[in-house]
Amino acid sequence: MKEQQDHDFWHQKWASNKIGFHQIEVNPHLEKHWFKIAPTKEQSVLVPLCGKSEDLIWLSRFHNNVIGCELSDIAVKSFFAEHLYTPTVITLDSSHSLYEFDEISIYVGDIFTAPLTPVDRIYDRAALIALPETLRIDYSKRMDQLLVSGGKMLLITLSYPQHEKQGPPFSVERQEIERLFSDYTITLIDSDESEFVQQKAKSGVSRFSEQVWLLEKP
């Protein structure tokens, strides 16, 4: 029931075009830090809960296989329409479909049930922080299933006093990341408390930062 409520929440956001979480430009942390995971063209990349992110286009410049997964078909159709791409659309089953165009493939459906195959790299800008605490353990297990041994993940999180602001996006602190990915080598590679980031914070939040993590699977 909780998971269905989460689905309904995001479907409503896209249907009503209340998508303040969508960034119209490539995420600066992606541009700054992606090469720290030593990417190659041959490596496949998964972008969970991708929406219609411009990050997919950027990643496709450096990888031959960029895979998104998004719950809302409105978001996926908008992504291809806005870039004037005409994708091949494949109905996989009653709950999932696949949109493909050149290097980019996007699965429409639940990240927990979509027929995804293991990948070399994961880029998570807004997936973990979009999920309520009750779903984060299942999400981390799912990412672990989908990341090959020796794979790497670039994870962007938010840090703020959770009691001061209702998510999503939620605050996810280091202790929780270490608990969710306990077998991984976890490195904080950036913490952004710039004026630009502070402007994103809702009024009444006393502390707010974006944090960038490198997670390496053994």
Image (cartoon, helix red, strand yellow):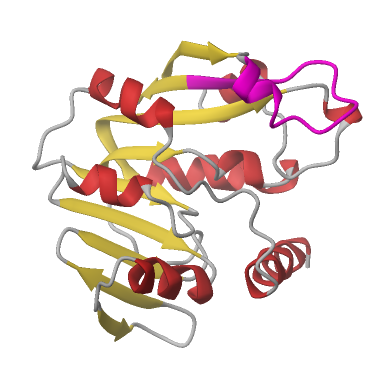
Measured as percent of width and height from the top left, residue 18 is found at 69, 62
Pick the front one: 114 or 58: 58
At x 64%, y 17%, the residue is 195
Q: Which residues are magenta?
A: 195-212
Residue 167 visible within the image: yes
Total tally of numbered discs in the picture:
0
Q: The C terminus is located in which quarter?
A: top left
Q: Left of 20 or right of it: where is 43?
A: left
Pick the front one: 196 or 152: 196
- Relative to 160, say whether 168 is above or below: below
- Relative to 177, say whether 134 is above or below: below
- Relative to 37, say whether 46 is above or below: below
Q: Left of 164 or right of it: where is 96?
A: left
| Quadrant position of residue 9 | bottom right
Measured as percent of width and height from the top left, residue 27 is found at 43, 35
Q: Left of 21 or right of it: where is 100?
A: left
| Quadrant position of residue 144 | top left
Q: Is residue 207 covered in magenta?
A: yes
Residue 218 visible within the image: no
At x 30%, y 27%, the residue is 34
Q: Is residue 193 covered in magenta?
A: no
Pick the front one: 98 or 22: 22
Q: Left of 115 or right of it: where is 63?
A: left
Q: The N terminus is located in which quarter?
A: bottom right
- Relative to 71, say whether 124 is above or below: above
Measured as percent of width and height from the top left, residue 91 is found at 34, 86
Measured as percent of width and height from the top left, residue 157 is found at 58, 29
